[in-house]
Structures are given as C-alpha cells and as structure tokens.
Image (cartoon, rainbow, N blue to C red):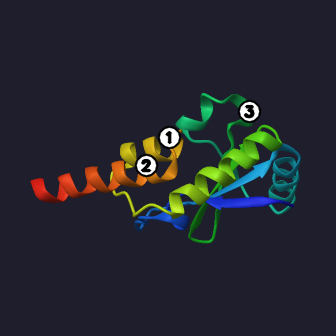
Amino acid sequence: MDFIITGTQVYGPTSNDSDLDIVVKQEDAVKICEFLANHNIEEYRAEGQEKYGELGGFYFNLATIKINIIIAFDDDDFNLWRERTNKMKELPEIPDRVLRLSAFNSHMPIDQLKRCVYGILNETLTEE
C-alpha cells in the first residue's frame, strides 16, 4: 500500500485535536474499509468530505488518534498530494488555516511562495 502522511502532523502546526491525514489510492481505501469492518471499527465522514461524494474520504478512531483517510482519485492526484505536502515542508509553520490551505493549493514557484508566506507572517507578527 502506497500512502502519504500529510497535513499539520507533517508540516505543522499541530494542536491537541489535530488528526492524522493519510492519502491513499482508491483501491487501498477499499482495503482499509474492509479491514475496519472486519475489526468492528466504525468509520464516519465529516461535513467537508460530503462535497466530494463517496470518494471524499473518511475518518476512524484508533485509540485516541483521529485518522483522516483522504482518497486520491488517480496516480496524478496522488502525486499532487505528495508534491504539495513536500512543498509545505519547506515553508515555516502557518498558524492560520485559511493561509495554510492557500499555500498548500498555490501554484507559485516555491521561492516566490516562501517570500509571500514569510511576508504575511512577518506582517502579522508586527501587527501584534
């Protein structure tokens, strides 16, 4: 099974309620669902996942850890998750969720994105 761990557990910042985001391909998501069902582990969906239909992903709890399974539609989608996750590791931790998602989805070259993020973060610190 090929997977990518992404989200704040990888590039921060984490909080007490941070989940563990794992990207898998569709066929592997089916295997995970089968495993969970066979072990009586309940899976559930969050409101944000509903907009992507059945392929949006799902959650399950493993002891005290909330696991978010993100389903990649195809190899290109899977590789895009990998590229964007690696890009985020090069940036400083971004506390603001909206800015963090914007940086994750940005098409800017990494050097330009770094300057932009550092500029915004420095401006925010100056205002406080």
Which of pointers 3 and 1 indicates the residue nearer the eye? 1
Asked if disc 2 and disc 1 are in contact, CB closer than 8 Å, the reply is yes
Does residue 77 sit above or below 60 in this rendering? Answer: above
Q: Estimate the x, y position of residue 98 in percent, counting from the top left.
A: 38, 42
Residue picked out by circle 3: 54
The residue located at (22%, 58%) in the rendering is: 122
Q: Nearer the viewer, residue 57 or 1?
A: 1
Which residue is at the front of the view, 117 or 104? Answer: 117
How far across and how far down the image is residue 94, in percent? Answer: 37, 57
Q: Tag 1, which secondary structure?
A: loop
The residue identified by callout 2 is 113
**Quick check: can you spot residue 41?**
yes
Q: Residues within 10 Å of mark 2 (few under 14, many from 20)?
A: some
Q: What residue type is disc 1 on?
A: Ser
- Whole-angstrom CA distance, mark 2 to mark 1, is 8 Å
- Element marked by disc 2: helix
Give how far across and how far down residue 123 sits, in percent: 19, 52
